[in-house]
Amino acid sequence: MTMAADFRARGWPLHTQKDRKPMSRKKKLPSSITHKPAGPRAPERWVFRGRNGTKPDGSPHFDVVTFYDEDEARDYDAGHSHRTARKALTGRPAGYTVAQTIDEFTGRPERSYRLDAGTRRRQTDLLQPFRAAHGTMPVRQLRRTHIEALAVGLLTGTCTIPTAREIAAGKARTAPRKWCTKNVNTLVALITAMLDFLRDDGFLDNNQGALLETYIDRPHVSEAPDDLEEPKAAYDLTEVEAILGAAGRRSPVVFMTSVLAFLGLRKGEIVGMRWDLINLDDGYMWVAEQRKRNRDRPADRAEGAPATLVDTPKTVEGKRKLPIPPTVAELLRTYRRWQLEMHMATGRRFGVDGQPPTHVIVRSDTGAAVSPEYPYDNWGHVIEAADVPYLKPHAARDTCATLLEAYAPGVTAVDIGAWLGHAAKDSAHGTTASRTTHGYIHEEAKAKRRATAATGWNTVFGPIVTICDMFAGSKTANRLVRAV
């Protein structure tokens, strides 16, 4: 009897060679991972060492990472080649410094936001403390603690780093100076955007600046009021009516400026609006131009450079075609007639087709276009006469969005975003995102969205915008009011 027959007779299980499991063999470690056994002072560990680009001097740069789990070391080694190839495509060396990153960030060509000379200079000035503190550090070694220590030092006034202008003038700061909370938050936001730029390009794996929170002004307990109220960000309908009434008593130009502000236009878009961008017959207006202050000092400007620059809106979404609400259309027709009457009363000769020389809606008494600070110059007097709490002129734009969302039926946040020209964060070119749903709408749907917002605007603001209020303080416009 064979052994197999004897096993079957006894009822014992019989395993063939096919049923037997092979002995498990431990996989050999890759050449880039070194196993370090446990010692009297260190636990068992696996050290990864892999090449990752070259240093600025041309010598090779290596990543050295220690793991206390073999599977984690193998996973890191598996993805290292992909990360190395991805970073090599960016064209930056492994030791890319913070100073090089700042130069690349401030000199980059933007698609959705055009950086003018003034904006670039302001970003350079704000990033100067960051450059002076960590300019020679490789950006991949930057940590949240470095950014946080710099921000706290600027807030508390313990940082003596000079600004870019002081360096250009050859001055060295000896006494510390406190930064306001707004500038520190702007600095942190710029650092976050700069690191986000490198992360999206594949050079960084994470953004250390995104781990910081926004700094706020916290009053001392003894200085804090008993009843803390939420700061006011927008006006209500009663206050809007009082503001427009006070603006009409001041002058028709100030009234028109206030109406355009509550229509949701920015201050540069208000003073840059021209009559040839408005089609009253079809009921549309193009927001395609803005006037902004030349931030260059007079000594640094080119010969003949004006103090006010004419440019396109600051964002791609800001250039938009808006349907004019019926109330505003009637107001613009009467206002245009009043402008022509005033020009003829002065005896001046007109330009082409009898239009004012500058073709602008908001102009001075001489017919010239006003500066971008014109809405600010008159806003304080209007608010004081209206006897309402003071908010900056940009609050009129916020009021437009707030009241439309609160009182206009059927108007959603996406409609308001399309109306105000909000740019979507991290969105594709030519789309607008809702602040709440983050849903995107494309160019073919924007006209319908804006038409809905225009109807809602006329429902909310139309009853308080009247032609009589515009000419409340004008003695020469009684005949026009009776004609209308």
Image (tube, grey):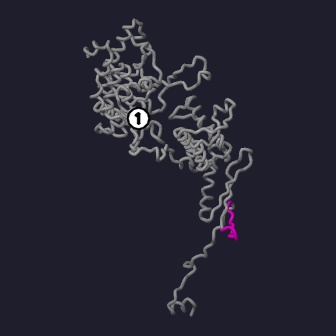
Residue 295 picture location, percent across and down: 55, 26
Crowd tier of the residue under label 1, counting other residues whose Cα lies within 10 Å: few below 14, some 14–19, many 20 or above: few
Vertical position of residue 16 compared to residue 35: above or below:
below
Q: Quadrant of the C terminus?
A: top left
Report the front residue among 5 and 204. Answer: 204
Residue in view at x 54 percent, y 79 percent: 19
Residue 148 lies, in percent from the top left, at: 58, 47
Q: Which residue is tagged 1?
A: 443
Q: Residue 210: percent from the left, percent from the top?
A: 53, 47
Residue drawn 65% across the image and 61% down it: 66
Residue 310 belongs to the span the image colors magenta: no
Bounds of the magenta span? 32-43
> Which residue occupies the foreground of this view, 405 or 355?
405
Vertically, is 293 above or below 5? Answer: above
Question: Is 196 or 92 nearer to us in this picture?
Answer: 196
19 lies left or right of 390: right
Q: How many numbered marks appear?
A: 1
Left or right of residue 477: residue 32: right
Image quarter of the N terminus: bottom right
Q: Secondary structure at mark 1?
A: helix
Q: Looking at the image, which residue is at 44% across and 12% down? A: 366
Residue in the image at 62% along x and 21% along y: 299
Q: Quadrant of residue 480?
A: top left
Three-letter code, disc 1: Glu
Q: Is residue 384 above or below residue 51?
A: above
Quadrant of the rendered structure where residue 475 is?
top left
The answer to whether residue 269 is seen in the rendering is yes
Q: Is residue 115 left or right of residue 470?
A: right
Percent coordinates x, y for residue 308 in the rendering: 51, 21
| Majority secondary structure of magenta residues | loop
